Structures are given as C-alpha cells and as structure tokens.
Amino acid sequence: MMVKKGTWVRIHDIVLTSAERSPNIPEDTKEVPLEMWTKGFLQGDAVVGDVVKVRTITGRDVKGKLVEANPHYDHDYGRFVPEILEIGLQLKELLWGGDDHE
Amino acid sequence: MNRDMSFQAVMSRKSEIMKKAVGIDYSVFEYGKIAFDYERMMRETGYTLQEMQTIQGEAGVGNTPLLELKNLTALARKLAPEKKGARIFMKDEASNPSGSFKARRAANAVYHAKKLGNKGVIAATSGNYGAAVASQAAIHGLKCIIVQECYDSTGKGQPEIIEKARKCEAYGAEVIQLTVGPELFYTFLKLLEETGYFNASLYTPFGIAGVETLGYELAMQFREREGKDPDVVVCTNAGGGNLTGTARGLIKAGANDTIIVGASVNLKGLHMASDKDFNKKSFTTGHTGFGIPFSTWPDRSDVPRSAARPLRYMDRYVLVNQGEVFYMTEALAQLEGLERGPAGNTSLAAAFSIAQEMEKDQIIVVQETEYTGAGKHIQPQLSFARENGIEIQFGNPQEEIQGKNIILPKDPSFIKAIDLEMDKIRRSYIKNSIETNGIQNIKDEDIQFMAVETKTTVEFVKKVMEEL
C-alpha cells in the first residue's frame, strides 16, 4: 500500500551487523545485529519495505526501511494476573481482621 | 561532514565529543594516579542549593509531599518484635512534573544546557530520566532526543520502556529505540556529534546536585513536622545518583546522623547486555545490574568522572526480590490508597523490613515514588513476565530464581531486606580502581582518596591493597 509523503511513519535500520558488534558483549547478543527504530515525517511517497528518508520531530533527516505508517502504542495493562487480587484481601484480613472492622 | 563514522572511529573520538557535549574539562580536577577533587568539581561546576531551589521551583519541580504510611506502619508492627516498628514515611516524588524525582536532575541539566546556549539536549536512558529531560526541555523550549535500549532481537519490547517512550514523545521529544547492547553509546555519540546538543547525562555535577534539594527538603519537612531528622532514609539504588544527591542534601541541611541505606532489586544471574535475558527481567531500573557495578566503579558512566558516588555516603546496602517489590506495590495501593510505579517501591519493600528492626519512636523514610500507568504497573509487568515463561507463585521470596520465577511473599512476614556485606563492596571498588584501570605506583593521595570514596580509613584501603 502506498504511503503518502508527509505521513508520520516508523523506520528501521541496522546500526551494526553481527560482525561489526563490540567484542565485549555476551555471545547471544553478538549473534544478532544492533537494530534501531526512529519515527518521522515521510519525505516522499513510498511503500512499506522501501528505504526512505524521514524528517524527525527535532528536524533531523534519517534514512531507513519503512515499517509502519501512523505508528501507534499498543502497550496496556496486560492480561489479568489473578494472584494480585489475593494480596489486598490478605493484607486487609491481617491488619483489620475481616468483619470486625465493618 | 566527511568524518569516519565507523564504530571504532566514533568510539575513539569519545573524549573529544564528550568534552564538547558536557562543557566540563574533568582533567582540571584530577590529581595523583586515581584521585580527583570531587568536592571542588561539585562546587565549581554545579549550583548552590539556593540556586537549585530557584531553578527547580521555576520549573515546577520539588517541594513534594511527605506522607506518613500509617497502615503499613501498623502492619509492620504486627510482624515486628514487641516495642519495635518504626514509623514509615514516603516522599511522594511522583508529584513532580514528569512523575519522578528525576525531574530534579533534569531541571538542572536542561537549565544549564540552555544557559550554555545549546539548542537541544540528548540523554541515553530507558527510564524515568528520559521523561524528565523531555518534560524540562519542553518547559525551556529546547529540542530533545532520548536514546533507549528497548527491544530484544525478536522485536519484543519491555512494556515499561515502551511507556516511557510514549511519555517522552508526549513532551515533544524524539525517541530513538534500539535493541539490546552497550553499543547504544555509539549511536549516542553519533547523535551528539551530528546535532551539537548538550549531553544531559545522568551523572554530571548539575544532575546530581539537582537531587540535593530532595535530601534537604526531607530534613526540613521532618524538622517542621516532627521536630527531628529522620533516623533512616532508604534510597532505591541503580546508577547511584539518587542516593548520592539525597545524602548530600541531608548533609547540607546538617542531618549528619541520618543513616543512609541503598536498596536494589536482586537480579542476580541476569546479564545486562544479554539479548536473551533482556525480557526475563521484570525491573528495568533500581536493580543490582546497575546498582552493584555503578557503586563499585562509578566512572563507568557516560562522563569521565561521575558525580554519583554512592559508596561515599552509603551506610548499608540491602537487596530485595522482585516478588517482594511487586507485593509492596500492591500493598501501597490497597492499604494506603497510593497507586505508584513498581521500580520506585524497591526502597519501600526494604523500608518495610528494616522498620521492624527499629524502635517505635524512630522514623524511616522511603525517599521517592514514581508515576504508574499502562505498561509501567504491577499488572502489565507481571503479565509480561508470565508471557515470557516466568512462573509467578506465592512462597518464600528468598527462593526466587531470577529469570525463572517471581515469588510473591505468601504473607508480609516473608519480606526481608538482605544485607550485602559493605566491606566486600568497598574492596571491590578499590580493586576496580587499581586493577581494572591497570594503575601502578599508587600514591598516598590516591589512598586517601579511596578511603573517602569508600567511607573507610587509610588503614582499610592499605589492607585491601595488600590482599590484591
């Protein structure tokens, strides 16, 4: 799908390939590249996967592979963790002894 | 610009880039083989307490509420031996503009950057400091770039760090997100060189001096309210700036008898630069992965001489486990009506345990809280842990195996702050100062310096040196 010039997008780039990485890092990290994600306004029409230029919010021009148009946050409060409920009930029981306090 | 931008070339320009980006020539404070004049550096490059109060006051930072946690105190007394159980207080630093005490550090650093005529500031941080710098940059009309270590190689990000990115962007900052690895520093240096912005390092004298107001306020608030200084102040310890600045502020107020305790979350066995371990951690700060190395080798930071030197001030260093901090975070919400972020509650878990050793008329203070929200909350952090194969169960937190499980205390009597042996940490500082830096022909002035650095004596340092 064509992404129009001026759209707020997210781009990806490889900063260091696995071979270029610092010698003083754990093996599992050395096996993978150092990757970077940046956001900015797309400087020309493009499709996802193209190498593009963006202008970041501070006005820097950065190149990278287009990964997403109108990137959004999807972090939330996660899935329900039932153990959490037990903590408050236990503490109130310990401190105020349940029914006596009502 | 036709400069060589390769990893090796940029790293070799480190000193030159840093000197320009911080505006301090650290070499003028150095003497001997190891030593440097810390107090002179703080005096000549930092700000006076009064100046800091003005700078912070104008930026809406500081003068945060001091809260007495009466229900948690009552609970601690139920568990403590007879006549024991100190009053637990908390300084609600979440009420600073960016939601944490880091606003104090950022206020000074950004003010200083503006004074020097910089157009923008850059900070390398995945934590609350990024949000603080972004917020202060917004107030002062400066541009801001935050560089984060955020994802593992599968592109999975820590929810807490993603939330911080959102918060930085909310203040108008540019956020650059990287996968795991210390070469973040390479990207950071390239950005400093490209933009000419100020390095709002966490470890400059301005940043650390910014936290002194916290310690000073604590002393003043307790004198007004209780007519005395707090007996114990517990500081969550990561890079050491929180503890250093708070302790210096207490000393500036004349609260010389207050015991300073550092507290970190125990993340033993999880390597900080490991791609695979990255998402097995349920804490992104306040943990031993920063706390121990930065205490025993403060100058590993992004400036030549860190102004955060926690061993100078620390009387005691305790560890708590992840499950204990999560439990206390929930306890704070359920018993005190205060929903705050987990990482800042590291010192709360420690204080809850230490209070039980103290007399009833004594006072123990948790000196900070941090904001909470999507991603940065006990619920998503435990949920994320479970998704990454970490078992969550009730039991004895001392049996927690970091990276495998999180053990929530089966009742609050299982919350126990475990003391680290201070002399062992001090020895490790001395060893790092000498051996890691390959220093020979140590001078008397270096020995004296290391004694001050470790809050010990010349005899202690000499004894450790003989054992090396």
Image (cartoon, rainbow, N blue to C red):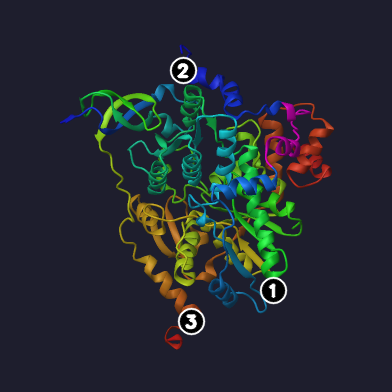
In this view, the residue in front, B66 or A34, is B66
Q: Which residue lies at the image location 24% right of the left edge and 35% below the top edge?
A: A69
Q: Residue B30 is drawn in which quadrant?
A: top right
Q: Which residue is mark 1?
A: B361
How far is mark 3 from mark 2, CA to CA? 64 Å
In this view, the residue in front, A14 or A67, is A67
Q: Residue B467's spot in the image, x, y percent?
A: 76, 39
Residue A96's disc is: 3
In the image, what residue type sits under mark 3?
Trp
Whether labels 1 and 3 belong to a single chain: the reply is no
In the image, what residue type sits under mark 2?
Met
- Report the quarter where the C terminus of chain B lies: top right
In the image, what residue type sits under mark 1?
Asp
Whether labels 2 and 1 belong to a single chain: the reply is yes
Number of marks drawn: 3
How far is mark 2 from mark 1, CA to CA? 61 Å
Q: Residue A50's spot in the image, x, y percent?
A: 23, 24
Q: Is residue B438 visible?
A: no
Q: Residue B332's spot in the image, x, y percent?
A: 49, 66
Of the numbered discs 2 and 1, the one sitting upstream in the chain is 2
Badge 1 marks a residue whose secondary structure is: loop
Q: Is residue B108 visible?
A: yes
Badge 2 marks a residue whose secondary structure is: loop
Q: Which residue ends up furthest to the bottom in the rendered image?
A: A100
Crowding at label 3, few (<14), some or many (≥20) Cα neighbours within 10 Å? Answer: few
Badge 3 marks a residue whose secondary structure is: helix
In this view, the residue in front, A89 or A20, is A89
Residue B26's disc is: none
Q: Chain of mark 1?
A: B
Q: Which residue is mark 2?
A: B5
Q: Is-magenta flag for residue B393? A: no
**From which residue to which does the magenta span run?**
B28-47
